[in-house]
Image (cartoon, rainbow, N blue to C red):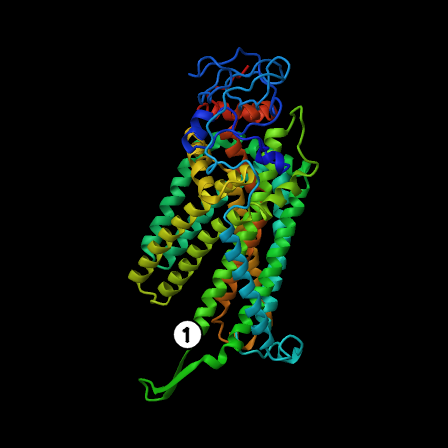
Amino acid sequence: MSQPYYQNQPGYPPPSQGEGAGFYGASNYPPPQPPGQGIYPPPQAPPMNYNQGGQPGAGYPPPQPPPMNYNQGGQPGAGYPQPPPGYDYQNGQGPPPKPAVVDSEKYNRTPVFRDVWAAILFFITLGSFVVYSVLAIRSLPSGTFSNPGKYRASEHFFSLPTIVCFLIVALTGFVISVVYMFLIQAAPRAMIIVSYWASVAIGLATAGYYFYRHLWWAAALALVFAILSIVAWFYARHRIPLATILLTTVVRIMRRFPATVYTGVLFLILNVLFLMWWAITLTATFSYLKHYESCRRFTNSAGRPDETCTNGRLIGVIVYLCFVWYWVTQVLYNVLHTTICGLYATVYFFDNSPMGFPTANPTMAAFKRATTNSFGSVCFGSLLVALFQTVRAILQTLLNAGGDDGIGAFIACCVGCVLGLIQSMLEFFNKYAYVEIAMYGKPFVPAARDTWRLIKSRGIDTLINDDLIGNVIGLGGIVVGGVCAMVGYGYISVVKPVYNATGNFTPVIVLIGFFIGISLFYLAGKVIDSGNATTFVCLAEDPAAMQRSKPELFEKIREAYPQVVSGIHHG
């Protein structure tokens, strides 16, 4: 019999304990069969009979097992995985229990490469970008990056001054992101409270701005959300102790395994380097495709000669470059996310267990899985979000070009809200699906489906909705984005390139700087966000493991959400 997936790949936590008939029964994923006595020694309980003629271990236990007592010997009871063939409860030898029916197509016990087609497509796309980038950059004039005399005199937006601006903005975002992460570690409770009210203040400021611009519908919508947030505080404040313990637990594991921070910094550097490369390629594109431009002379309404130029290939390449940017950054985000999820799941299931951790370096083991066996699944989920982000960017550009009239602004606001909602739903499913991928190596689609079923069956959806840690990450993105936007504004005001003599490009620089800052911080914040998401999914898989390894957190969750840990003994 082949070994379970997590045995072949060190660091995989044991799958669901006590969720056989509930979660795995619904999705046809039977619980794996670890060798020996499993991860946790079975409790003192007589052999259970689940409609299998009194045979111990036959079939799957119901979703709510009787009270459990860890770290004691005895016979296997409810809520535990099937013993392996040949295991006897008295001396480890004897006839095997009745085997479970396994759908080999839906549950593979060997580590295999998942969603290979998505990984191949990603490498093809990245390879095409590399080839195009080399061709485009080679088309730039030889003195583009070395002639200081042309620095201030550039007449084009995509030129050396703009590249330097974006590099300074990216470096600023990197430094501020690191500082903000240290603040989260130093004062988690204060950061939760401050971030909540800061989000309310931002909502009120947004409403005030829309009122000032006479965008009444947008102003009313922003004001309603701000008021609802104020009212919700009287409910949310009771969740602050739970959120504080969650955040403290995640941060404590970060300190215990500093490789999580190093991994986050590594991916942050990779993101900055790719941003530099991408910005230079975009700049070179205008020079490389200049000869495809088609111009037409005409006489305008004032009777003066005028000229209009179009370049269909340039537009197509810019759309392609935007798609590459979205997909590559999403893959970077999600490889980091899957790596951190693998580590936190390993700690959740193996911490304080008699067996200890299955590998000396769980972070490296999780990173290896995320970049090999599960890389195709990472690319698949990232592709969905990248496609939607590209379409959203195109639609937003078309809407913004439609004019500044009230009806157009209202339509743009509505479309932006709908698109943002759909994108948020995609990212939400991805985040929790990658936890299952990190734990069990499932393909992307089954992981997303099974994660949602598991969350709904345990009531974790309520806990996720009440989560306040997301506000801390969200505020960090806004703070870093705002600082980067101000740096971009200060740079363009001091350098004063020729192309911005009228100030028309200042809002563009500020907006791009803001999004660069947000992107950089969210990559750094992935470490905390991933640990938090993993805690939710692992809690749904096996609440009893948290009772053993994190009793304080378990009691807080039991007090606030008793339905989540129903069936678990609280003695």
Q: What's the amino acid at mark 1?
A: Gly
Quadrant placement of the C terminus: top right
**Among the 4 quarters of the image, the one containing residue 465:** top left
Q: Position of residue 202 (x, y in %)?
A: 46, 49
Q: Which residue was labeled with disc 1?
A: 312
Query: Residue 379: where, in percent of width, then height?
Result: 51, 51
Q: Nearer the viewer, residue 208 or 331?
A: 331
Residue drawn at (55%, 77%) of the image? 498
Quadrant housing the N terminus: top right
Q: Is residue 217 above or below residue 287?
A: above
Please state which of residues 386 and 421 is positioned toward the viewer in this rendering. Answer: 386
In terms of secondary structure, where does tag 1 sit?
A: helix
- Residue at (48, 50) in percent of width and height: 380
Residue 549 or 121: which is nearer the viewer?
121
Image-based side of 298 in relation to 168, left or right: left
Residue 98 location (% of width, % of height) = 50, 20
User: Would residue 256 appear left or right of 324 to someone viewing this image?
Assistant: right
Left or right for 417, reference 74:
left
Residue at 46% across, 38% down = 105
